[in-house]
Image (tube, grey):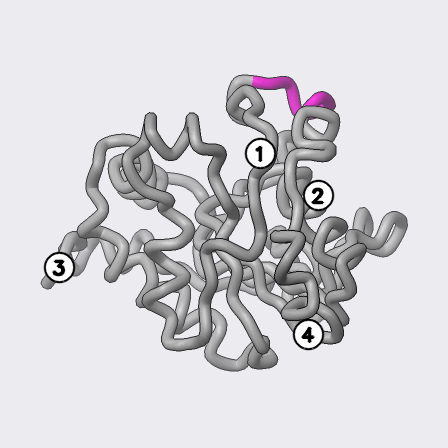
């Protein structure tokens, strides 16, 4: 049924304990990883249903880079199941694309997922104001600088952020640099707290 056969669904959808702040895989009974204890991220919580690896990484790449927007319903269903016990946000905001990237890709993959989650979602409140090189093309230690200052809240709508619980929606979380920059932008605009709902979390670069 849908884009996944039974065997691939079983391999793809493997729920496991994750750090509550960055969604990295963790042993059971340990709610927060050591890195988040040492340097707490601006995200209050992070949730991800799957690890970014075979066969799911191929499915996400087809969705994102090969104009397979029809996969959004399947992927949104996986994310909806993963966050069913998370605190309900006042607003869902998809990770925005620059105009150049939107023209290149043809659709915003995060928005197509966010608008199918059954909560209030808005694609025009958090803006991408600066185009940057693809994060995947950069060394891990350069990704934070690459996205610094790349986001802004729509100036005429800042009041809609103030005091609100916001959940960011994205497809893949790697270093967390992009999510952290978006979260800092929203907190500076007055958001009470910012959580992240992401479809897939990569393992740490040094993981076996």
Note whether 61 is above or below 44 in the view shown: above
Q: Circles 3 and 4: CB distance less than 8 Å? A: no
Quarter of the picture containing the C terminus is: top right
Pointer 1 residue: 208
Q: Which secondary structure type mostly characterizes the magenta part of the structure?
A: helix
Dividing the picture into quadrants, the one containing residue 100 is: top left
Q: Secondary structure at mark 1?
A: loop
Which of disc 2 and disc 1 is earlier in sequence? 2
Q: Is 92 left, or right, of 111 in this rendering?
A: right
Pointer 3 residue: 2
> Between marks 1 and 4, how big is the CA–CA gap?
39 Å
> Between marks 3 and 1, how big is the CA–CA gap?
32 Å
Pointer 4 residue: 164
Mark whose residue sits in front, 2 or 3:
2
Q: Which mark is residue 181?
A: 2
Mark whose residue sits in front, 3 or 4:
4
Q: Circles 4 and 2: CB distance less than 8 Å? A: no
Quick one: label 4, few (<14), some, or many (20+) residues within 10 Å? some
**In this view of the protein, which residue sits in the foreground, 87 or 99?**
99
> Between marks 1 and 2, how big is the CA–CA gap?
28 Å
> Between marks 3 and 4, how big is the CA–CA gap?
35 Å
- Picture residue at 44% right of the left edge, 54% below the top: 199
In this figure, what is the number of numbered marks?
4
Which of disc 4 and disc 1 is earlier in sequence? 4
Report whether residue 153 is seen.
Answer: yes
């Amino acid at each position: 049924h849908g884009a996944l056969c039974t065997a691939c669904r079983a391999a793809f959808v493997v729920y496991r304990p994750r750090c509550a702040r960055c969604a990295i895989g963790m042993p059971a009974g340990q709610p927060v990883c050591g890195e988040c204890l040492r340097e707490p991220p601006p995200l209050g919580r992070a949730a991800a249903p799957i690890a970014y690896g075979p066969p799911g990484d191929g499915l996400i790449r087809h969705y994102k880079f090969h104009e397979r927007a029809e996969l959004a319903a399947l992927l949104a269903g996986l994310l909806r199941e993963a966050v069913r016990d998370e605190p309900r946000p006042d607003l869902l905001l998809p990770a925005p694309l620059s105009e150049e990237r939107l023209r290149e890709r043809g659709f915003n993959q995060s928005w197509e997922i966010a608008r199918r989650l059954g909560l209030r979602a808005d694609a025009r409140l958090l803006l991408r104001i600066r185009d940057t090189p693809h994060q995947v093309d950069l060394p891990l230690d350069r990704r934070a600088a690459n996205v610094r200052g790349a986001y802004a809240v729509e100036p005429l709508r800042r009041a809609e952020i103030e005091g609100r619980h916001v959940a960011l929606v994205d497809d893949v979380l790697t270093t967390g640099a992009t999510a952290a920059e978006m979260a800092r932008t929203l907190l500076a605009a007055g958001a009470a707290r910012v959580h992240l709902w992401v479809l897939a979390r990569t393992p740490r670069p040094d993981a076996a």
